[in-house]
Amino acid sequence: MSIETIKGAFAAFRGEFTPPGDKSISHRAVIIGSLAEGTSTVEGFLSCDDTLSSAKAMMMLGVPIEIQGDSVEIEGKGLFGLSEPEDTIDAGNSGTTARLISGLLSAQGFFSTITGDQYLRVRPMERVVKPLTLMGAKIWGRDGGKRLPLAIQGSKLSAIQYRLPVASAQVKSALLLAGLYADGDTEVVEPTPTRDHTERMLSYFGVDFHKNGTSVKIASQKPFKSGELQVPADISSAAFFMVAALVNPNSEVLIKNVGINPHRTGIIEILQKMGGSIEILNERDLNGEPVGDILARSSHLKSIEIGGEIIPRAIDELPVIAVAGCFAEGETVIKDAKELRVKETDRIKAMTTELRKLGADIEELEDGMIIKGKETLKSAKCSSWGDHRIAMALAVAGTRAKGTTEIDDADCVSVSFPGFFDVMRRLRS
Ligand code: S3P
């Protein structure tokens, strides 16, 4: 396990960079490309532990996929061309792989099993197992189907109308993928809108569905053709450098080609509301996904209250938003974010524990945190809790701590952003 050290020299972050490809879109590219007929190409693919779990899963289902750096070629097998995997599919640390692929496996004419690493095996799977079972899927799992490993006997599925009890793009996407095969119209209704990359990509591939407010309806599908995809850079990876630039003096960072899907831009809205100088430049479209360049400059941040509909639109960025709160004037409140407790780790507990080690004034709430801003933090030995976004958020906090901060088990950043520490060193030098 690697230890990274961050020097809290208040050094400026300056320069420009393009973050690696969007993780959510990269997962969907290999999964949906595998279901298309013919060869699909993907450029800008995020080649990281999580997305490779999805690619390997599709390869185990008989789909030839070639990955060279950020270019991928997928020989799609069509909707009905997947084959039974000989072994258990390993989703690794990736909830997106486990949940989306469970939806797909439920509709295949074969038996399969899927598991994950020690972190994923304790995360809730009932949220997909329950609605898939209502569609007629046969799924067994530990703890009455609540946890991985899952065993799935593919079956003929019936369409359902399902109201998601929690806002989750992974569950919505699992049901839409299963709905491609169900007889009739599968309708998913969300409590608050979540990222719609699955819908946008299916639409790009010519698949028909209807969206009405928070309802998405998909009909049983006919085969669809392959396509050429370009993946924008990941706003969730950009977020760490937006905050680093805002909270450090004399900083100006241009983050290029970033996906700015409105269901993902909560981070920008929140930081702007805190007084952060963030501008979106050069807005354009990439395969039905909006992209732009993001310019972030040193700013005097003030505290705000964050809760309600913006939470699902900033869910993965809340750890680094908590770091911004550490340096904002006043008391920043993050609430309605109970979902953070079932991410790669309990991110509320992880952030309050680790930021306290760094001297932050932070209170743990059942569904969030209250943070009183300070001028500086102190250095400490911190743990990533094996969670990529905790490691990166703590690294940003460490840039404004006095002395040198150590982050243990920091190589987990490879789950979403291999090369994160190199970019950090380059922009600070
Ligand atoms: C994701 C959805 C979100 C997010 C995760 C990626 C996706 O999870 O936190 O990092 O790609 O659909 P939930 O669906 O569990 O909210």
Image: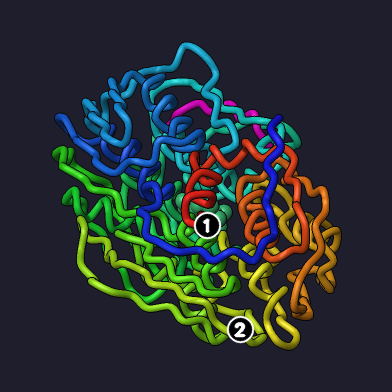
Q: Residue at x 32, y 24 (%)?
A: 82
**Mark 2 lies on residue:** 301
Q: What stretch is highlighted in magenta?
A: 145-155
Q: Quadrant of residue 140?
A: top right
Task: Using the image as rendered, state which of residue 256 and residue 140 is in the foreground.
Answer: 256
User: What secondary structure is the magenta-colored segment mainly?
Assistant: strand
Task: Using the image as rendered, state which of residue 89 and residue 288 is in the foreground.
Answer: 288
Amino acid tagged 1: Arg
Amino acid tagged 2: Leu
Q: Which residue lies furthest to the top in this view?
A: 86
**Mark 1 lies on residue:** 428
Locate residue 338 relative to residue 158 in the image: left or right: right
Please, is residue 248 above or below residue 92 in the view? below
Give percent across and percent down for residue 327.
Answer: 69, 76
Q: In the rendered structure, does residue 147 fall within the stretch colored magenta?
A: yes
- How packed mark 1 is, by other alpha carbons closer than 10 Å (few <14, some 14-19, many 20 or more), is some
Give percent across and percent down for residue 79.
Answer: 26, 33
Residue 340 visible in this rendered orientation of the protein: no
Q: In the rendered structure, does residue 142 fall within the stretch colored magenta?
A: no
Locate residue 357 relative to residue 107 in the image: left or right: right
Q: Which residue is drawn at 67% across and 61% down?
A: 9
Label drawn at residue 364: none
